């Protein structure tokens, strides 16, 4: 029968005021807030917690609206791009969802490895239980808009055809042929409730008062830079030091000043070291490191050193390297020795401060270092006073930073102070990392060879004002760092899946770097319990042939470790690490040797 339509006469379209009243009325009702809470809970469970518990490879781009249900049964490979409104519904027994590397999905794609049984018409479908079966998508696959991949389907390598309703029907047919009926368990999903607060991975030493007062420091006075240089020189027994805008700037200045092309560095090091050398005109040659203290091996250095070399001897994380052996090699061959003390201010070696063994040494004031300045700072020392004078003349070409630099880095300093609060830090971490499926802000392997703020300038007067109180109280900062390190070392238990760093009573470390199996999974579990951790050099740039460095990069996690860390926070970290390590099953082949 043909439907009858009635003509509507004198229809008046609702105006903007009508819709505005409707929106305002809906907002002020109790139902709005109830639905909002439900929506936030739904998003947290299916998107945030799901992303933390699923196994996700490197360099993946996953849209914030992607739902991951039964996430422990979901594995996504490297370099995948998962578009908005994708749904991953894994099963509870055998219904795993496995995506290979370089998989690309369009919007509204669904992977359903868990569904209703429908074997007979005599019994209502709702009473026939459920079944699940695995879904496998191999490498280099593109899945088009709106595709539905059902349980039991395997998509071969390089497939680009799955798209739309026709392919969903084909997937359903495949699913009916391939899947097998499984027994159903009446078990509910387990949800992990995340703590609202999050202990930051690092905190700065300076205060709101110092940052506010720095606004009134005159740039041209030179009062605080002179005092800072005197205090540092006195600590090292030097006549003078050279202040720099960062540690990496100090290295770049030394390489360009020395004009030697061959620069030897440890294979496990920050990529900023490589960047600074290249920007200074040097060529980088890597040397293998020890898997115990992560420092350069002198026996490997001996194979490549010559009279034209510059050797960068890093005291990694503050643990001293075998500096006396390296110093002896450099003297015998005529090589120049530069100590990388960016992380080892306060470390001593047989009573002598780190930085006093090489021909030159550079240090860093960063947000993660012993002394913190917004955003960075540093200094250079030279063994010979004449070299210090020449360097002072050489850096005259570096300008004092201007007003825009001051505004920018004061704001950054303000942000660092705000992020000392555990609740604000949780929000920051969620927006900048969790929503983007990142574990650190910079996950790039690419080298940045541009002269940015950390290279172009000298240290500003107001930055020297921020650093000076910390240098004057350096012994206090060192004592507290060592106290926390000792507590970690005595209380954290080594297991087959967790290895503690070396302990040296003379070292003042800036990291407590544990090594764990399945680093990403271990980290996500710490996040749910309210503890963030740093990733030291997970993306190193040395060749793959340096196996020690690669293994270290794959396993290292840095515990929260800074001067103003409270005793109860240290206890919380220790208990959490011990609990997670005890819960983590050991793999058949031990990664940590």
Image (cartoon, grey):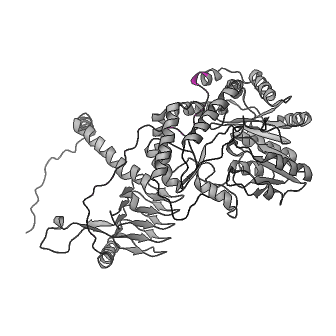
Query: What number of labels is visible?
Result: 0
Inspect this view and state whether residue 9 appears.
Answer: yes
Residue 458 placement (x, y as % from top left): 76, 34
Which secondary structure class fits the magenta region best?
Answer: loop
> For the point 48% across and 68% down, which residue is it?
100
The image shows residue 25, relative to residue 190, as above or below, that is: above
The image shows residue 467, relative to residue 581, as above or below, that is: above
**Residue at the bottom extreme?**
177
Quadrant of the drawing holding the N terminus = bottom left
**Residue at the left extreme?**
1
Inspect this view and state whether residue 221 appears.
Answer: no
Residue 456 appears left or right of 131 = right
Residue 239 placement (x, y as % from top left): 86, 28
Magenta stretch, residue numbers:
181-209
> For the point 65% across and 30% down, which residue is it?
479
Q: Is residue 190 magenta?
A: yes
Residue 375 placement (x, y as % from top left): 64, 35
The image shows residue 494, relative to residue 353, as above or below, that is: below
Residue 288 placement (x, y as % from top left): 73, 58
The image shows residue 121, relative to residue 350, as above or below, that is: below
């Amino acid at each position: 029968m043909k439907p009858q339509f009635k003509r509507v006469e004198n229809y008046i379209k609702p105006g903007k005021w009508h819709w505005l009243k409707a929106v305002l009325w809906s907002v002020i009702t109790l139902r709005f807030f109830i639905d909002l809470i439900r929506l936030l809970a739904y998003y947290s469970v299916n998107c945030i917690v799901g992303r933390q518990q699923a196994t996700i490879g490197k360099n993946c781009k996953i849209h914030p609206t992607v739902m991951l249900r039964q996430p422990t049964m979901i594995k996504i490979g490297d370099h995948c791009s998962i578009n908005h409104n994708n749904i991953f519904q894994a099963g509870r027994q055998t219904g795993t969802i496995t995506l290979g590397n370089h998989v690309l999905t369009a919007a509204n794609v669904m992977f359903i490895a868990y569904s209703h049984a429908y074997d007979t018409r005599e019994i209502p479908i709702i009473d026939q239980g459920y079944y699940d079966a695995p879904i496998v998508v191999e490498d280099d696959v593109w899945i088009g808009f709106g595709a539905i991949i059902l349980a039991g389907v395997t998509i071969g390598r390089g497939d680009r055809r799955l798209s739309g309703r026709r392919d969903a029907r084909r997937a359903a047919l495949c699913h009916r042929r391939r899947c097998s009926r499984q027994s159903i368990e009446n078990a509910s999903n387990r949800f992990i409730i995340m703590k609202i607060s999050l202990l930051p991975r690092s905190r700065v030493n300076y205060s709101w008062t110092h940052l506010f007062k720095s606004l009134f420091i005159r740039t041209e006075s030179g009062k605080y830079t002179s005092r800072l240089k005197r205090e540092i020189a006195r600590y090292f027994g030097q006549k003078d030091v050279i202040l720099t805008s960062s540690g990496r700037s100090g290295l770049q200045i030394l390489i360009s000043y020395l004009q030697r092309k061959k620069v030897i560095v440890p294979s496990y090091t920050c990529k900023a070291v490589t960047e600074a050398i290249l920007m200074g005109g040097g060529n980088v040659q890597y040397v293998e490191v020890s898997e115990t203290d992560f420092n350069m091996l002198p026996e490997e250095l001996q194979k490549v050193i010559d009279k034209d070399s510059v050797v960068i001897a890093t005291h990694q994380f503050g643990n001293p390297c075998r500096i006396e052996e390296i110093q002896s090699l450099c003297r015998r061959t005529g090589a120049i020795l530069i100590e990388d003390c960016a992380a080892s201010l306060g470390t001593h070696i047989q009573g002598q401060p780190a930085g006093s063994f090489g021909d030159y040494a550079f240090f860093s004031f960063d947000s993660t270092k012993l002394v913190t300045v917004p955003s960075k700072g540093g200094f250079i020392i030279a063994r010979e006073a004449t070299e210090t004078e020449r360097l002072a003349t050489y850096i005259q070409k570096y300008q004092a930073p201007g007003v825009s630099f001051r505004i920018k880095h004061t704001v950054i300093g303000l942000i660092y102070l705000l992020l000392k609060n555990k609740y604000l830090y949780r929000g920051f971490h969620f927006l900048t990392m969790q929503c983007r499926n990142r574990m650190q802000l910079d996950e790039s392997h690419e080298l940045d060879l541009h002269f940015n703020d950390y290279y172009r300038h000298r240290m500003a007067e107001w930055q020297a004002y921020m650093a000076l109180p910390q240098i004057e109280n350096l012994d206090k900062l060192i004592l507290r760092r060592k106290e926390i390190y000792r507590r970690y070392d005595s209380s954290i238990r080594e297991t087959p899946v967790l290895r503690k760093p070396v302990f040296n009573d003379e070292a003042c470390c800036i990291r407590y770097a544990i090594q764990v199996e399945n680093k990403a999974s271990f980290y996500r579990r710490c996040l749910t319990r309210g503890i963030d951790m740093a990733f030291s050099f997970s993306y190193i740039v040395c060749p793959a042939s340096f196996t020690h460095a690669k293994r270290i990069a794959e396993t290292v996690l840095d515990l929260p470790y800074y001067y103003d860390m409270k005793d109860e926070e240290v206890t919380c970290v220790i208990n959490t690490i011990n609990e997670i390590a005890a819960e983590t099953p050991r793999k058949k082949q031990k990664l940590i040797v």
